[in-house]
Image: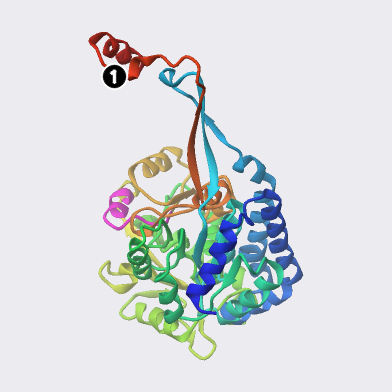
Amino acid sequence: MEISNLINQLRSRFHQGVTRPLAWRKQQLQQLRKLLTDNEQAISAALHADLGKCHSEAWLSETGFLLSDIDHTLSHLNKWSKPRRVSTPLVAQPGNSYMQPEPKGVVLIIGAWNYPLQLTLAPLVAAIAAGNCAVLKPSELAAHTDKLIAELLPAYLDRDCFAVVQGGVEPTTALLAEQFDHIFYTGGEAVGKIVMRAAADYLTPVTLELGGKSPCVVDSDTNLRVTADRIVWSKWMNAGQTCVAPDYVLVEKVFVPKLLDAIKDSLKRFYGDDPRQSQDYGRIINLRHFERLQGYLEGQNVVHGGQTDPESRYFSPTIVLEPDWYSPVMQQEIFGPILPIVSIEHIADAAAFINQRPKPLAMYIYSNQSQLSKQLIAQTSAGSVCVNDGMMFMANPGLPFGGVGNSGMGAYHGQFGFDTFSHLKAVMKRRFIFDIPLRYPPFSDSKLSILRKLL
């Protein structure tokens, strides 16, 4: 079916009111949950084929995350969808005012390859909850997961309200030429700009979940072993191909040797002497990204790792010490298993260092000193901040997830996702009694005097 005809079909179903009843939305969410539980092994196999993810990591970061998201949404959907009452000013009395969430219509969701299931279906959970029809465009780079989504979604969800479009640049370009009521894109900054330019033709609102170089500030006053474990977990999960992974570490020069040894020890305990043999360590998505990462190591001081195998797309956990800021590894988002460690003279210098760069998607602070954390949070800007852990804010549906500046715009997760795909329609209801004619012509000084007191 041609893309324009597909969208017209979805729009027709939306205008028929099919997606508006809460019972229908809940049923679709239950079906999406069933899709995940029925096909857990097939999903795990697809993620392993695409990214080398082990079953535990696939469940933790993709399937399990989505199941938790769906359950949270089902538990709160009645509350989220109710009118949200606000006060009514004296001049508009008697009356009452509220905001009524309503679905936007037909939305486009463009997923990413690094978490190809989660980053395609988590926005869909929010879109369904809000009562929309949706077109999904999974990433073609994660080919096995892309194919699985295209096969499974029509078997579980309403085919007249949800559709999957596969392919690369050509179908994506065709989709962006159409009019949607919201576009949700997860990916890189360059394509994010293309999406935003296309959306501007129809004044379509967009949510851009991008990335950036997320800093990790480590104070010398910290629990060293736990800090190292949590940095290693958050950096090398999915072989570093995570938008909120710590992109570089800032640490006082005198503390570098201790931190470096602790990180090496954590890597050995997690992945063994040879991570290539570990069942828990992933692979790079394709050869193009593999070669990009190899290029980042040219001329660098590699103090750990650096072993690679293009045939299996294996890239070992790698640490670079004191990289040149103007080198590619410090100018581009790494999105891979390379961790630069940058020393600073004093931990108080971290804020100035971070503020000289574009606003990151996430920032991590490891310190026993609460005052240091407060200062860094107050003096810098980031989409999210996590103190004394890595990425765990993602597990809290009560927190919005989204970027700021170059790292994105808009947010989702929990009610924030519901609101992203909803229009909060302002409503005021008044009565016909007490229609005092102060606002009507002819005007007078006395009328104006009274109005000044009421408004």
Q: Is residue 308 magenta?
A: no
Q: Position of residue 154 (x, y in %)?
A: 66, 72
User: What is the x, y in percent for residue 173?
Assistant: 40, 76
Q: Quadrant of the C terminus?
A: top left
Magenta residue check for 356: yes
| Magenta span of residues | 350-362
Q: Is residue 328 left or right of residue 415?
A: left
- Residue at the far right: name it: 38
Nearer to me, 243 or 193:
193
Q: Is residue 303 above or below residue 84?
A: below
The correct choice, above or below, for 266 with respect to 294 in the image is above
Direction front: furthest residue? 442
Q: Could you tell me if residue 55 is visible in this image?
A: yes
- x then y, percent, for residue 284: 50, 79
**Label 1: which residue?**
441
**Residue drawn at (46%, 86%) of the image:** 287
Using the rendered image of the protein, determine whether residue 137 is visible from the camera's viewpoint.
no
Q: What residue is drawn where x is 65% and y is 74%?
A: 54
Taking 190 as reference, is 276 left or right?
right
